Structures are given as structure tokens and as C-alpha cells.
Image (cartoon, helix red, strand yellow):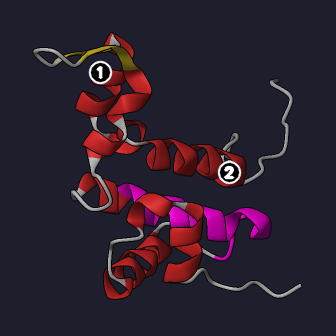
């Protein structure tokens, strides 16, 4: 089965939070994801990784709800009277740290990246014959 690159419609179907973002903007971020998601990725993960990376970058740039759209996942308390909201320390630290851990989209991208790119890498050295010490 041939690989098909994701479209803006695919991204908004997977991540409805970006439905209000224009197709041109989404396509820009999908194209930008090609710097990190290449044809050496697992084919079944490639489109999902491109969309996750694009969604992460859009969220970090304030589109589709931004980081604030991801914070409710760490919500520990909410009051309506005088608006008393509390978030878990772990969720606040994750968002403050930035990187892929700052959004749920980035966390998904990091998982896919580990699956396609993770593991030990071996760097070759020229072979030297064993010579007994005399």
C-alpha cells in the first residue's frame, strides 16, 4: 500500500480542536513536519507523526486552543463562584518545561518518534586484527 501524505482535512478529523484553523496554516505546519518526519519512519506511523507534530507546533503558537487547551487534562479542582482553578503540579511542570511534553500532541509525537527512531545506535569502527602480545 502506497503512503499518502495527510491533508488539513485529515488533521482536523484527528484533532477537532483545530477545525477553526485555516487549511493554509495547517498545510504550512504539515509541510514543516517533513523536517522531522522523513520516509525512514515506520510507514504506518508516518502520517500520524506528521499530524501530531503539526498540531503540537500550532498549539505552541496559540492556534487551536494553544497550551491553555491542553491544561484541563491536569485540572484537579474547579470552582465557579469566585473562579478558583487548580492544576496538578505535574501538568503545570510539563507545560512550563516546553518541548514535546508541553502538549498532548507533542507527547503523541514523542511516542511515535521513539517507536520509529528509538533504540541504540551503533557506530562502526575499522576492524583491527587481534595480535597477541609478545
Please check the rendered image and state whether residue 28 is part of the magenta-colored stretch, yes or no.
Answer: no
Which picture quadrant has residue 17? bottom left
Q: Is residue 125 above or below residue 54?
A: above
Residue 37 seen from this side: no
Residue closer to the observer: 46 or 92: 92
Residue closer to the observer: 39 or 107: 107
Report the Cα–Cα distance between label 2 and label 1. 42 Å
Left or right of 10? Residue 4 is right
Question: Tag 1: Cα neighbours inside 10 Å, few (<14), some, or many (≥20)?
Answer: few
Q: Which residue is mark 1?
A: 93
Which region shows up in magenta? Answer: 39-56
Please check the rendered image and state whether residue 41 is part of the magenta-colored stretch, yes or no.
Answer: yes
Q: Is residue 129 above or below residue 53?
A: above
Left or right of 78? Residue 48 is right
Q: Is residue 47 above or below residue 76?
A: below
Instruction: Tell how many labels.
Output: 2
Residue drawn at (34%, 60%) of the image: 57
Residue 79 seen from this side: yes
Which picture quadrant has residue 87? top left
Badge 2 or badge 1: first in the primary sequence: 1
Q: Which residue is mark 2?
A: 125
Residue closer to the observer: 22 or 58: 22
Residue drawn at (33%, 81%) of the image: 22
Q: What is the chief secondary structure element of the magenta stretch?
A: helix
* Position of residue 129 measured from the top left corner of the image (x, y, whole percent): 84, 45
Amino acid at each position: 500500500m502506497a503512503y499518502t501524505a495527510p491533508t488539513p482535512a485529515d488533521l482536523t478529523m484527528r484533532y477537532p480542536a483545530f477545525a477553526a484553523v485555516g487549511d493554509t496554516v495547517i498545510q504550512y505546519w504539515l509541510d514543516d513536519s517533513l523536517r522531522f518526519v522523513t520516509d525512514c519512519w515506520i510507514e504506518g506511523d508516518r502520517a500520524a507523526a506528521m499530524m501530531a507534530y503539526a498540531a503540537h507546533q500550532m498549539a505552541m503558537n496559540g492556534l487551536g486552543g494553544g497550551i491553555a487547551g491542553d491544561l484541563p487534562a491536569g485540572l484537579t479542582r474547579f470552582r465557579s463562584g469566585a473562579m478558583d482553578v487548580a492544576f496538578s503540579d505535574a501538568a503545570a511542570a510539563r507545560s512550563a518545561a516546553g518541548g514535546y511534553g508541553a502538549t498532548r500532541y507533542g507527547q503523541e509525537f514523542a511516542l511515535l518518534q521513539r517507536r520509529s527512531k528509538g533504540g541504540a545506535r551503533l557506530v562502526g569502527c575499522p576492524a583491527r586484527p587481534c595480535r597477541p602480545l609478545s
